[in-house]
Amino acid sequence: MDSVFGFLAFLLIFLLAGWLHLPVLEKIMYHVVNVAVLAVLIIFQPELRIALSKLSLKGKQYREITALDKFVDNLSSSVYRLSIKRIGALIVLENKDSLEEYAQKAVLLNAQFSSELLETIFDTSTPLHDGGVIIRGTSIVSAATILPLADESSQLTRSMGTRHRAGLGTSQLTDALVIVVSEESGNVSIAREGIMTRGVKIDRFKGVVRSIFNPPQKKSHFRLLDWIKE
C-alpha cells in the first residue's frame, strides 16, 4: 500500500512540475523515472525472464498447433479428393515402430509432404501408384512400397482387395495408422491395431489422425511428433 501512495505522490509532483512550468524539477523527475525503470528491470529480472519464457512457450505451442492443423487438413483433403475420383490409395503413417525395412525395398523419396505430391503418386498414369506410401512426420519416405498382407482374420472379407489386405496386415504387425482408399467404391478405410474401420467420414478421419499426434495420457513420444519438436 505504501508503494502505491508513493507512486501516486511521485506522479502528482511530476504533473505539477509540468503544469507550474518548473523545468528544472521536471527534468530531475524525468531522470528519476529513467533510473526507476532501470532499477525495476534489474530487481525483477528473474521474474521477467520467467514471464518471457512462458510467452515464448505459448507462441511455440501456437505454431505447433498451426503446423499440425495444416498437415491434417492437407492430408485429409488429398485422401478425400482421391476418394471422390475413386483412385485407389494405400497410405501408412509411421508411428513408434520403424517401417524402414519396408521403405528400403521401395522407391525412396524422402520428400516433404504436399497434397500435390501425394495425389500425383497415386495417379494411375504414374509408375508409383501400385503399392503404398510411407509417411514419417511430414516426409513422404517411400512410394510403391510392398507391405505385408493380412493373415487369416475375422476382419477379412471377400470384398477386400490387395490394398485392404496390405493395410490390415501392416496394422497387425506394427502400430502404424494405415489409410486405404477403395478404387471400386471410393470409400475411405482406416486400419489400426489389426482392426479396420470402413466408410470413414472426413471429420472422423481428422480426429483419428490427430489422436496419433496427441495420444491421450501417453508419456512416450511418437515419431510423428519429432518434426514438431525440432
Image (spheres, grey):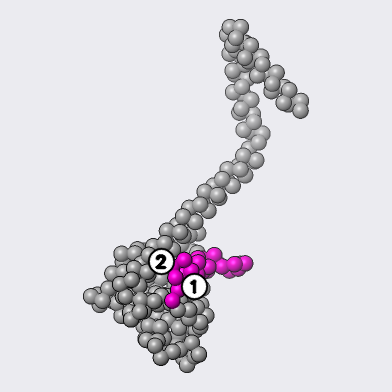
Residue identifier under label 2: 76
- In x, y percent, where is residue 83? 35, 72
- In x, y percent, where is residue 111? 34, 66
Q: Which mark is residue 95?
A: 1
Q: Is residue 45 above or below residue 28?
A: below
Q: Quadrant of residue 167?
A: bottom left
Q: Is residue 211 magenta?
A: yes
Mark 2 or mark 1, earlier in chain: 2
- In x, y percent, where is residue 173? 49, 83
User: Can residue 22 be seen in this snapshot?
Assistant: no
Do labels 2 and 1 touch, CB within 8 Å? Answer: no
Q: Residue at x 40, y 83 (%)?
A: 164
Q: Is residue 104 above or below residue 203?
A: below
Q: Is residue 31 magenta?
A: no
Q: Residue furthest bottom?
A: 152
- Front: mark 2 or 1: 2
Q: Which mark is residue 46?
A: none
- In x, y percent, where is residue 107? 31, 76
Q: Is 168 left, or right, of 44 in this rendering?
A: left
Q: Nearer the viewer, residue 23 or 93?
A: 93
Report the span colored magenta: 199-224
